[in-house]
Image: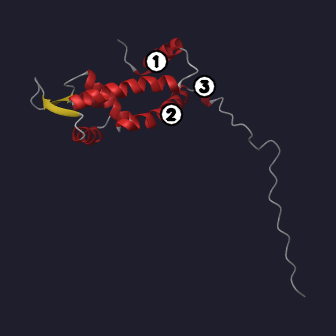
Amino acid sequence: MTPQAQPEADPAPVAAGLAVERVDTSFLETLIGYNARRAALTIIATFIPRMAQFGLRPVEFSVLTLIGHNPGITARQLCATLDLQPPNLVGMIKGLEKRSLLEKRDHPSDRRAQGLHLTPAGESQLEQAQATALALEVDATPRLTPLERVTLLRLLRKIYQPDH
């Protein structure tokens, strides 16, 4: 007598009401951090490909922007403003120097520090990159009116900027 094959067991049925058709994010949507992160991810998804032409990641763009608007800013000031760790900034500065976008100069009042300055190539690239950044933010937020955009920026700054 040959052993008969046992029929395969049916997969366990899904209990009624446990299959998720639509993910409920309602609680998360009440949290500022969740919404800020989701908005940032949306902007970054547009930022990365558009800034690829300049070879800039978001943090490099921020560093160049601060140097461009604050000639002579020190690495310490950059770290404090952008909440960066000094070792992370050192490599980034070296890379931007190697690309001839910025240069170090002696600080006028602190012999231990060096001021950071954009080169002419850095100034030109920053000007183009900033125009691109402004346009991509509008493109990434098509459902916001200009007034809503201004309001959103004002409200977000109230979260992280110290009282003046």
Which residue is situated farthest in the bottom direction here? Answer: 1
Residue 131 position, x and y percent, is: 38, 23
Labels 3, 1: front one = 1
Amino acid on which disc 2 is placed? Leu
At which x and y percent is residue 144?
Answer: 56, 18
Front in this rendered view, residue 108 or 68:
68
Q: Nearer the viewer, residue 105 or 113?
A: 105
Q: Residue 151, how many percent across, how many down?
A: 50, 13
Which residue is depicted at the point 82% across and 68% down?
Answer: 8
Question: Which of the marked residues, 1 or 2, is nearer the chain's N terminus?
Answer: 2
Instruction: Identify the mark nearer the N-term, 3 or 1.
Output: 3
Q: Position of residue 12 (x, y in %)?
A: 80, 56
Task: Judge left or right: residue 112 versus residue 127.
Answer: left
Q: Nearer the viewer, residue 30 or 37?
A: 37
The circle on residue 153 is: 1
Q: Secondary structure at mark 1?
A: helix
Dot 2: element:
helix
Amino acid type, mark 3 = Thr
Amino acid at dot 1: Leu
* Disc 1 crowd, CA 10 A, few/some/many (<14, 14-19, 20+): few
Query: In the figure, is residue 57 to the left or right of 156?
Result: left
Q: CA distance from mark 3 to mark 1?
A: 19 Å
Front-lying residue, 41 or 156: 41
Q: CA distance from mark 2 to mark 3?
A: 18 Å
- Residue bearing the label numbered 2: 41
Q: Nearer the viewer, mark 2 or mark 3?
A: 2
Q: Residue at x 47, y 33 (%)?
A: 44
For label 3, the residue is: 30
Q: Which of disc 3 and disc 2 is earlier in sequence?
A: 3
Image quarter (top left, top right, bottom left or bottom right) of the C terminus: top left
Q: Secondary structure at mark 3?
A: helix
